[in-house]
């Protein structure tokens, strides 16, 4: 397993899901992200980041609320949004940046 910086700097599109175990909307996102992964396959890497266990990453990406989703390509933020997002929107975004 590569370390975080290698993954986010790769040419593969990366979807970061900043979440917390106590967050109800984050629980709603879990099956949506599973569907996204099934549809996009190896086109993108999806990483779930628990903000309570990784506060330094939360600070780096200035996470104010959870869930916050961020799409990266070559380490560069291409899109970010807070709140529950529909699977098709995320699939379309991944396809757009892949």
Image: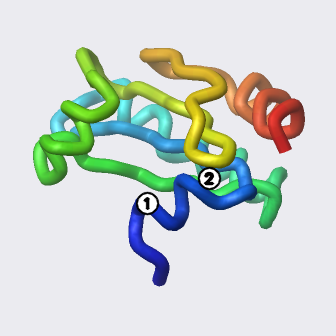
96 vs 39: above or below: above
Disc 2 + disc 1, Cβ < 8 Å:
no
Count of numbered tags: 2
The image position of residue 53, as x and y in percent, is 13, 52
Give left or right: position of 67 versus 37: left
Numbered badge on residue 5 = 1
Looking at the picture, tell me which residue is in the foreground, 39 or 10: 10
Looking at the picture, tell me which residue is in the foreground, 52 or 55: 55
| Mark 2: secondary structure | helix
Q: Residue at x 16, y 36 (%)?
A: 22
39 vs 27: above or below: below
Give left or right: position of 86 versus 23: right
User: In terms of image quadrants, where is residue 33?
Assistant: top right
Q: Is residue 77 visible?
A: yes
Give left or right: position of 15 versus 64: right
Q: Is residue 21 visible?
A: no
Q: Residue at x 73, y 56 (%)?
A: 11
40 vs 56: above or below: below
The image position of residue 85, as x and y in percent, is 59, 21
Numbered badge on residue 49 = none
Real-space Cα separation, disc 2 to disc 1, in angstroms:
23 Å
Counting residues from the N terminus, which is met first, the one under dot 2 or under dot 1? 1
The C terminus, quarter of image: top right
The image position of residue 25, as x and y in percent, is 37, 25
| Mark 1: secondary structure | helix
Q: Check the image and tell me how it is coloured.
A: rainbow
Residue assigned mark 2: 34
The image position of residue 37, as x and y in percent, is 70, 55
Pair 2/1: label in front: 1
User: In terms of image quadrants, where is residue 87?
Assistant: top right
Q: Residue at x 87, y 38 (%)?
A: 95
Q: Residue at x 50, y 66 (%)?
A: 6
């Amino acid at each position: 397993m590569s370390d975080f910086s290698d993954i986010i700097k790769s040419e593969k599109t990366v979807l970061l899901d900043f979440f917390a175990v106590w967050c109800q909307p984050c629980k709603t996102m879990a099956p949506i992200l599973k569907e996204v992964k099934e549809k996009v396959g190896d086109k993108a890497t999806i990483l779930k980041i628990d903000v309570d266990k990784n506060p330094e990453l939360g600070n780096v990406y200035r996470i104010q609320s959870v869930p916050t989703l961020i799409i990266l390509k070559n380490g560069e933020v291409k899109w970010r949004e807070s709140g529950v997002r529909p699977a098709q929107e995320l699939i379309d975004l991944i396809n757009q940046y892949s």
